[in-house]
Each structure stands twice: as C-alpha cells, then as structure tokens.
Image (cartoon, rainbow, N blue to C red):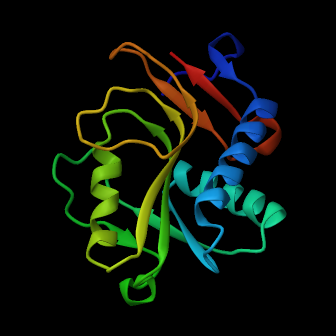
Amino acid sequence: MPDLKPENQIIDALTINKMIRRMAFEIYEDHFEEETIYLAGVAPQGFLLAQRLKTALESIAPIKVHLIEVRLKKTALMQPEVTLSASLSELSEKAIVLVDDVLNTAKTTAYALAPFLNAGVKSIKTAILVDRSHHQFPIASNYSGYALSTTIGQEIRVKLDEPEKQAVYLF
C-alpha cells in the first residue's frame, strides 16, 4: 500500500463530513416513508462509512437505522462466500442501502449484492463515497459523495478509521 502523503490527498476530513451528511439527507429523502432501513457496509472501509452514515441519518431523521457488516474477498476472481452479520430472514421486505468506500469496476458491489437478492428485500440502493467510473458491471451508485474520473493505473485510498485524519488519496 502506498504511503498516505499530504501531496496525494484529494479530499480532506471536513469535505468527507459534508459529503456524508449530504448522502444521509439523500438517503432519507428516498426512504422517508420507511420506519427502518438497513445500511450494509462492505468491510472494512464500507462498514466504517456505513457507521458514519448511520450517525448522520439518526441526527437528521426519525428513522431506525440498523447496520450490517458484509464480508467478502475483494481480490477473489469468484466469490466463495459472502457473509452478513444479519440473518437473511430479518431482511425480508426491508429497505437496504449497500455502502462501500470506492466504486471502481463494480465487481465487489455486484458480489456484495448477491445475498440480498436471495433475501426478498423490499429495495436495494448503493451509497459510495468515491465513484471512479470504471464500471465493468451494470452497477451504479444511487448516493455518491464524489465522482472522479481517473486512469486505470491510478489508485484511490480512503482513510476513515481516525475521524481527525480521515481523507481520500489519489496515487
């Protein structure tokens, strides 16, 4: 992993906080009739983003927000298994927002959606902090913090684990 140097930073902590708050408002606008929504974060970074979105949503809306951690092998050509921290039966007829930090080829998002398709959910939307627009799968972001055109050889790193040091880097 490249060093996270200031000269590679393209988005700072203040801007990330604003993007998360804006995304929370957009999510609520689309789900204002729901009593409960489920934010399913792709571990590790997507789950951190889902936690932040949950906090933002709860501060602006009277909606119950449940978190689900989605675990998969992002580097696997074929996914052996996608695991959720919730049972599929509790997701039946629920509104789901799948959350991840970066949408590049959309392969990870496509795999992460699979268990929800088998759960009989009411709706599935996606929330992505940075959309790189190199999609190889027919997946789009419903809620995006930042859309960025990059070259294939460039890399985006998102740091969310320390609130005061959170940032997005381009290499």
Asked whether residue 139 appears in the rendered view, the answer is yes
Image point (69%, 53%), residue name? 24
- The residue most toward the left is 78
Q: Does residue 26 appear to the left or right of 99 in the view shown? A: right
Left or right of residue 150, residue 4 in this image: right
Q: Position of residue 97 (x, y in %)?
A: 50, 61
The answer, for residue 74, to whether it is visible in the render is: no
User: Quadrant location of residue 72?
Assistant: bottom left
Q: Residue at x 28, y 70 (%)?
A: 117
Q: Residue at x 33, y 26 (%)?
A: 134
Task: Spot the residue most to the front.
Answer: 33
Judged from this view, the residue extending furthest toward the bottom is 89
Residue 97 against residue 83 in the figure, above or below: above
Percent x, y of residue 46 = 53, 51
**Residue 156: percent from the left, percent from the top?**
50, 26
- Residue at image position (76%, 30%) is 15
